[in-house]
Amino acid sequence: MIIVVVLFIRATLVQAFNIPSASMQPTLLIGDFILVNKLVYSLSEPRVGDIVVFRYPVNPSLDYIKRIIGGPGDLVEFSSKEIAGKKVYSVSVNGNEYSLKYIRDVKFNSRTYYEFEETISLNGKELKHRIWFSSHPTKVAGLTPYVKVNCLRYRYNLCVKFIVPQGKYFVMGDNRDNSEDSRFWGFVPREYVVGKAFVVYFSGEVPPLTPADVNFFTGFKQLFLALLNPRFERIGKVLIP
C-alpha cells in the first residue's frame, strides 16, 4: 500500500530531482536536491520566470531544468550592452527589457563570472533572481542557425529577434554563458514540461555530471556523496518567486 501511495505521489504530485551541472548557478548549485510540483501545470500554464523541469527535446529520456524566458507568442530580443564596465547582453520580451543590476564578481572553477540581478516585470509584479555572465563568454546571445524559427533580426549569423512558436517555451539557464538551452537546440513543447521547481530539500558537495553520466543509479550515488559533504545552509531554499 505504501509503495502504491509513493508511486501515485511521484506520478501526479511531487517528484525529487538533483542538479548535475552548473547551468543554473547561482540559483541552483551542483549537488542541490530539489522538489518539483507536477500538479501545478495541470491547473495553470507555465509562466515566464518559472524554473521548470522538462524532457529534453533532443532526447526525451533525459530531464533538464532551466528558467522560462519567453512563452507562446512572446517576442524575444537579445541586446548587447555594457553595465558597470561589464560587457553582457540583456533580454527583452514583448518590448519589455529584463533589467540588469551588477552585484559582484565571482570566482568559479578558475573562471571569473559577473553576477547580476535580473528583474522580470510580470502582471504588475517584479520577479528578481541572480544570473551569471562569464568574463570570457563561450556561449552566444541569440539562436544558432540550428534552431529553426522565423527570424525577425540576425546578428553575426545568429537570430537575435524572434517570436516563440505557439505551444512552446524559450528557456535559458541562469548561468548564461555556461548553459545548453533553447539558444542551441530550440523550444520546449508544452507537453514536455514536467513541473515547477519550488524548494531545495537537501544539498551537498558532489562532482558535476554530463548527460552521458546519467543512469538509474546516478541519483542514489549523488545523494550518498551529498550526505557525506552536506551544505545545510541551502536546505529549505525556496525557488518560487
Image (cartoon, rainbow, N blue to C red):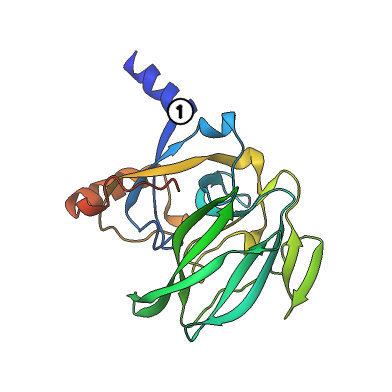
Q: Is residue 146 left or right of residue 42?
A: right
Residue 195 in the image: above or below residue 129: above
Instruction: Give the farthest residue toward the top.
Output: 1
Q: Is residue 171 left or right of residue 238?
A: right
**Point 45% across, 28% down: residue:** 13
- Amino acid found under the numbered disc labelled 1: Leu
Q: Residues within 10 Å of mark 1 (few under 14, many from 20)?
A: some
User: Relative to the observer, which residue lies in front, 160 or 58?
Assistant: 160
Q: Position of residue 65 (x, y in %)?
A: 49, 51
Query: Quadrant of residue 81 in the image?
Result: bottom right
User: Relative to the observer, which residue lies in front, 42 or 18?
Assistant: 42
**Point 57% across, 34% down: residue:** 41
Question: Residue 231: in sight, yes or no?
Answer: no
Query: Quadrant of residue 10 in the image?
Result: top left
Q: Is residue 167 left or right of residue 139?
A: right
Q: Which residue is mark 1?
A: 13
Q: Position of residue 85 (x, y in %)?
A: 48, 86
* Numbered disc total: 1
Instruction: Give the farthest residue toward the front.
Output: 124
**Point 40% across, 58% down: residue:** 27
Name the quarter where the N terminus is drawn.
top left
Q: Position of residue 181 (x, y in %)?
A: 58, 60
Residue 13 in the image: above or below residue 152: above
